[in-house]
Amino acid sequence: MARRTATQPGRPRPVTLVVTLACLVLAGWAVRGLLQSPVPAVDEFGSSSISIDLPSPSQSSGIVLAESVPRPRRASAALEPVEAGREPVRLTVPAVGLEVDLDAVGVSADGQMEIPDDGDRAGWYRHGPAPDDDGGSVVVAAHIDTKEGPGAFRALTGVSEGDQVLVELADGRSMAYRIVGGEQVAKRDLPVDALFRRDGDPVLRLVTCSGDWSPAAGSYTANLVISAVPVP
């Protein structure tokens, strides 16, 4: 039997410290899981000519380890910046009491669409169309919840077809939309090119996490996509 080495009184053993830190991390994820799972079920609803053909939840499966937000798959540097005053700064859905300030976001170092860390704020993808453009997909994403509690876009689980969405621009104008559809899709099946398209009929996409919470992945398994069209 190997001889045990005595430790100095009052000094924690390195192994003990590592185990303690690991427990704290696991406890943090456990708390997050309690806050985030389960997400209320979302039924598919609505129809629209600008559908992005999302598969039904029954066709979606699997756990995505790397993606927790959509990956634009486009070179942000190739796009013209939106003129000052045209950027969206606030979004409201009166029917579900959703009111959230918007930050202009881009692409993070790992290629994912950025999302504000603050669960009470949402991110508008600034390298895509602006709300007052004639066509393309305006993408706004936010957390469904955080370690501190529910996020702003948890309210999206309660929207219905026909609900109004209002987007306020920096210059004071307000753009009105009408919700026409909502679907849940596994993250690996998300049609990203269609979601971030820059042409075609104008549409607003509201995106958040959904599905089951995976402690191993540290994320949800699916995305909820709510689609809305401009109101003339």
Image (cartoon, grey):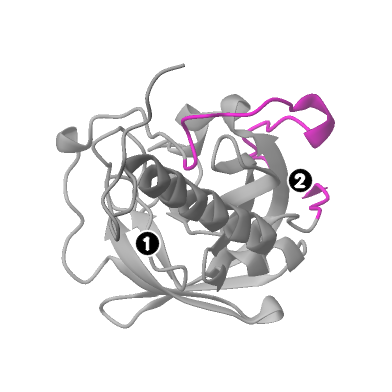
Question: Which residue appears at 32% of the width and 42% of the height?
Answer: 14
Residue 56 position in % (x across, y down): 79, 33
Of circles 2 and 1, which is in front? 1
108 horizontally vs 159: left or right: left
Q: Does residue 58 show up magenta in the picture?
A: yes
Which quadrant of the rendered structure holds the C terminus?
A: bottom right
Q: Amino acid at mark 1?
A: Asp
- How far, Cα to Cα, is label 2 from label 1? 32 Å
Going from the N terminus, do you reach mark 2 or mark 1 first? 2
Q: Amino acid at mark 2?
A: Ser
Residue 80 position in % (x across, y down): 16, 44
Q: Say which residue label 2 marks.
A: 47
Seen from the viewer's position, the closer of residues 77 and 22 is: 22
Question: Which residue appears at 68% of the width and 36% of the height?
Answer: 185
Residue 12 position in % (x across, y down): 33, 53
* Residue 117 image label: 1
Badge 2 element: loop
Magenta region's main secondary structure?
Answer: loop
Q: Does residue 56 show up magenta in the picture?
A: yes
Badge 1 element: loop
Quadrant housing residue 101: bottom left
Identify the magenta region.
Answer: 41-69
